[in-house]
């Protein structure tokens, strides 16, 4: 529900604005409201799970998300929809951090990899499936609901998730329940909002000075948050976010690489949607079905990553995933540049599959590596930090890609006009348009395309595009020529911008070398960062802890979950591993 709602709204946004008689700025807030609510509550939501119980907070988040979706579907104006979207995002901030925390504390390490493989496949598939679901719902228009169906579909799904979670998901909480940190929650939410809001809204507003002032203020507020968390740790050891997490190399390096990864992917998803739906003019269903190739690749990559590749090749599997994702982007660059506006969906399948497989090979093993040394007490907090970094990465990647994309689109508008104008001149001549009128139309055509390329809203019709035309036949010729020129400009701009995406994946590749080659999980009942009693989980013997054995992405999990955990021994110049099976 969460990931679908990030992308599905973009598909029906024009219908929403028309039906509610809303301005384009309302549309931006309908999208941004969800992201802001989500990002603001992720860290607090993760910690609430540690304190109150992860299943309880998960159920509360799902129920709230479902209710907010109903409010979105019943909204009678843009203000009501924006408020419901913010609430929907906030409830996702309660719901989503619990997922990884529940996986982390419920499953032993030899099973957790399989579960994370499934989770990674869902993550990648859902990121692309929003376009498919949006297209199908827009095409089917069930019960005449129109755009409202994309929100109301969450109601039965949410009800089913509540029922399943009530009976199937075990509850857990931190063994030593930390106290809630209201000041830390306020500072973290304020800092994240001050950062994400200008990143989300800046391009559409032309990056006014206040956007940079807010981002500067975000740095100060987040700095105060870190200082406050240090003081809270010294006083009663119950901070909102445990700074000790960052002492583990796997966590700190993993967070940096995770941010880079989502900067690249956030930018890709943004310009990809623009390219297919605005540039090529594809209907939502066609664009959505094309994106399913990426979803298939994600499922395949995630399904095999933790189960097969990571246990055998360790960090090399993640490196291969980053290379494959970047290779898929470069392949897409070649396809877009070669075929231009005439590109067909089937020609996009190969690069999308390759990029999707690479995505899957990175996501699930990265999560396992990052959370490997996180103790049960901090599982929710760590998951909240992970999700927050992901959201900030997506927002930053979208902002950066938007700046690059629209600057290039504006820069290349004259070239697109120069390529389209000769054909339009010939068509106007055949339509027996007088020479003086023909030149006036061509000048207006150039102005229209230039203004459209420079607009912050690529779907808006500039005033220069509304000039009078002598006949419906001529109008049809001009519109068709404009669509060809726009598609040509978008194709070239997409190809150029996606090169930066491939370059970002190159940085991810290099960043992965900062991760430990052998990531070991030192049991939650032994020494090391995971020391302490495990959570009380229904079904565990005597209500005891669910304890995870050593897992090594190179040698695989220990064969005996009950065997004593210890640091790896070295003998004869060789690393004997954490378990004889290694």
Image (spheres, helix red, strand yellow):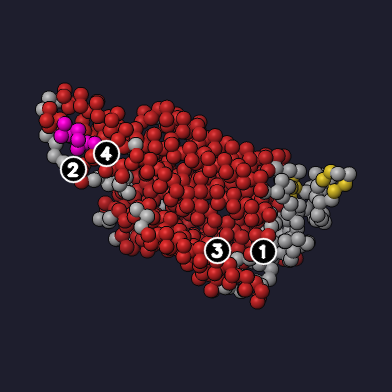
Does dot 1 land on a helix, a strand or a loop? helix
Check if residue 444 falls in the magenta segment.
yes
Quick one: label 2 or label 3, which is nearer the N terminus? 3
Whole-number angstrom distance, CA of label 1 to CA of label 4: 54 Å
In whole angstroms, how far apart are the C-alphas of marks 1 and 3? 15 Å
Q: CA distance from mark 1 to mark 2?
A: 60 Å
Residue at the image position 55 percent from the left and 51 percent from the top: 259
- For the residue pair 554 and 221, the one nearer the viewer reads as 221
Which residue is disc 1 drawn over? 244
On screen, residue 313 above or below 247: above
The residue under the point 52% across, 35% down is 328
Quadrant for the C terminus in the image: top right
Give the residue number, with chain letter if any, for mark 4.
449
Label 2, on which residue?
A: 466
- Magenta stretch bounds: 439-446
Q: Secondary structure at mark 2?
A: loop
The answer to whether marks 1 and 3 mark residues whose Cβ atoms lie closer than 8 Å is no
Q: Which residue is mark 3?
A: 43
- Which residue is pictured at 51% across the width and 66% down the height? 220
């Amino acid at each position: 529900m969460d990931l679908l709602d990030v992308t599905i709204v973009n598909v029906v946004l024009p219908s929403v604005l028309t039906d509610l008689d809303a301005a384009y700025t309302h549309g931006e807030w309908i999208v941004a409201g969800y992201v802001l609510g989500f990002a603001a509550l992720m860290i607090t939501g993760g910690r609430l799970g540690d304190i109150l119980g992860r299943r309880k907070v998960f159920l509360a988040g799902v129920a709230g998300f479902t209710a907010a979706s109903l409010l979105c579907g019943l909204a009678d104006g843009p203000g009501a929809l924006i408020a419901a979207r913010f609430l929907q995002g906030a409830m996702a901030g309660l719901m989503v951090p619990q997922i990884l925390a529940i996986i982390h504390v419920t499953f032993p390490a030899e099973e957790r990899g399989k579960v994370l493989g499934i989770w990674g496949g869902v993550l990648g598939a859902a990121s692309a499936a929003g376009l498919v679901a949006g297209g199908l719902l827009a095409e089917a228009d069930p019960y005449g609901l129109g755009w409202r169906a994309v929100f109301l579909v969450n109601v039965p799904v949410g009800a089913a998730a509540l029922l399943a979670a009530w009976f199937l998901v075990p509850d857990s909480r931190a063994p030593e329940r930390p106290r809630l940190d209201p000041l830390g929650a306020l500072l973290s939410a304020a800092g994240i909002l001050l950062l994400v809001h200008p990143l989300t809204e800046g391009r559409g507003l032309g990056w006014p000075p206040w956007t940079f002032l807010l981002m500067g203020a975000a740095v100060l507020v987040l700095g105060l948050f870190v200082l406050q968390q240090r003081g809270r740790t010294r006083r009663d050891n119950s901070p909102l976010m445990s700074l000790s997490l960052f002492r583990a190399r796997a966590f700190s390096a993993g967070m940096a690489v995770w941010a880079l990864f989502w900067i690249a992917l956030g930018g890709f998803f943004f310009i990809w949607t623009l390219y297919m739906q605005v540039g090529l003019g594809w209907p939502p269903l066609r664009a959505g079905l094309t994106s399913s190739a990426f979803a298939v690749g994600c499922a395949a990559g995630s399904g095999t990553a933790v189960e097969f590749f990571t246990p055998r090749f360790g960090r090399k599997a993640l490196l291969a995933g980053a290379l494959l994702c970047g290779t898929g982007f470069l392949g897409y660059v070649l396809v877009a540049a070669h075929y231009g506006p005439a590109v067909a969906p089937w020609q996009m399948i190969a690069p999308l599959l390759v990029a999707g497989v690479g995505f899957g090979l990175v996501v699930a093993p990265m999560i396992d590596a990052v959370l490997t040394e996180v103790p049960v007490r901090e599982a929710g907090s760590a998951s909240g930090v992970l999700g927050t970094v992901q959201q900030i990465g997506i927002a930053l990647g979208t902002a950066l890609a938007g700046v690059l994309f629209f600057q290039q689109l504006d820069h290349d508008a004259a070239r697109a006009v120069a390529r389209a104008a000769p054909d339009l001149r010939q068509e106007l001549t055949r339509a027996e348009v007088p020479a003086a009128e023909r030149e006036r139309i061509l000048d207006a055509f150039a102005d229209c395309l230039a203004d459209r390329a420079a607009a912050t809203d690529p779907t808006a019709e500039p005033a220069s595009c509304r000039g009078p035309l002598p006949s419906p036949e001529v109008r049809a010729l001009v519109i068709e020529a404009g669509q060809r020129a726009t598609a040509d400009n978008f194709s070239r701009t997409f190809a150029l911008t996606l090169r930066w995406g491939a370059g970002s994946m190159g940085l991810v590749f290099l960043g992965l070398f900062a991760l430990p080659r052998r990531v070991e999980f030192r049991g939650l009942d032994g020494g090391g960062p995971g020391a302490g009693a495990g959570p009380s989980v229904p079904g565990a013997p005597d209500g005891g802890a669910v304890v995870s054995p050593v897992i090594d992405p190179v040698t695989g999990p220990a064969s005996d979950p009950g065997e004593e955990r210890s640091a790896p021994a070295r003998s004869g110049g060789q690393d004997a591993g954490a378990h004889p099976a290694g």
